[in-house]
Image (cartoon, rainbow, N blue to C red):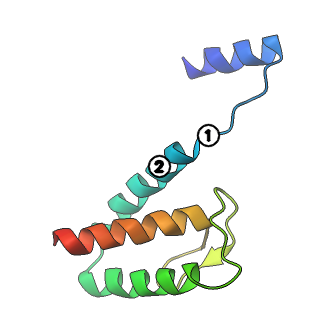
Amino acid sequence: MTAIRDILRRLTGQPEQAPKPDRIDYSYRVFWAKQARGWHADRRTSVLEAARHLASASGFEANAFERRYRVEGLEGEHAGASLLALIRVLEALDVVE
């Protein structure tokens, strides 16, 4: 169905719509929840502290897709919105467990 929508959009000349911020946040939260559930408590705590520290630094931007931030304990670089979602997931896991 999505492919048909994309074809019709191209044929009619309509611009491609960017994902809405709430859908981006939801996607990041689902991703991080799947990842973090398998982490031991010490790792969740250390990643949470590192992500909070980075998010509170001056110049941090909650950008949706551009991967420009590295967090101790995580592989690769991550978007700011992704790290904010990670923080919320880890906080929620800490409350639940």
Residue at point 37% right, 64% down? Answer: 35
Q: Residues within 10 Å of mark 1 (few under 14, many from 20)?
A: few
Q: Amino acid at mark 1?
A: Pro
Looking at the rendered structure, the secondary structure element under dot 2 is helix
- Label of residue 28 in the image: none
Residue 13, position as x, y percentages in the image: 83, 17
Image position of 91 with respect to 30: above or below: below
Q: Please name the residue that numbered disc 2 is placed on.
A: 27
Is residue 38 visible in the rendered structure shown here?
Answer: no
Quadrant of the drawing holding the N terminus:
top right
Residue nearest the observer in this picture, 94 or 8:
94
Residue nearest the observer in this picture, 57 or 13:
57
Looking at the rendered structure, the secondary structure element under dot 1 is loop
Name the image quarter holding residue 61.
bottom right
Look at the numbered discs 1 and 2 and tell me whether their residues touch, using CB distance below 8 Å. yes
Q: Answer with left or right where residue 39 lies relative to residue 11.
A: left
Residue at point 56% right, 82% down? Answer: 56
Q: How many marks?
A: 2
Image position of 51 with respect to 20: above or below: below
Give the mark, 1 or 2, whose residue is nearer the N terminus.
Answer: 1
Q: Please name the residue that numbered disc 1 is placed on.
A: 19
Image position of 94 with respect to 14: above or below: below
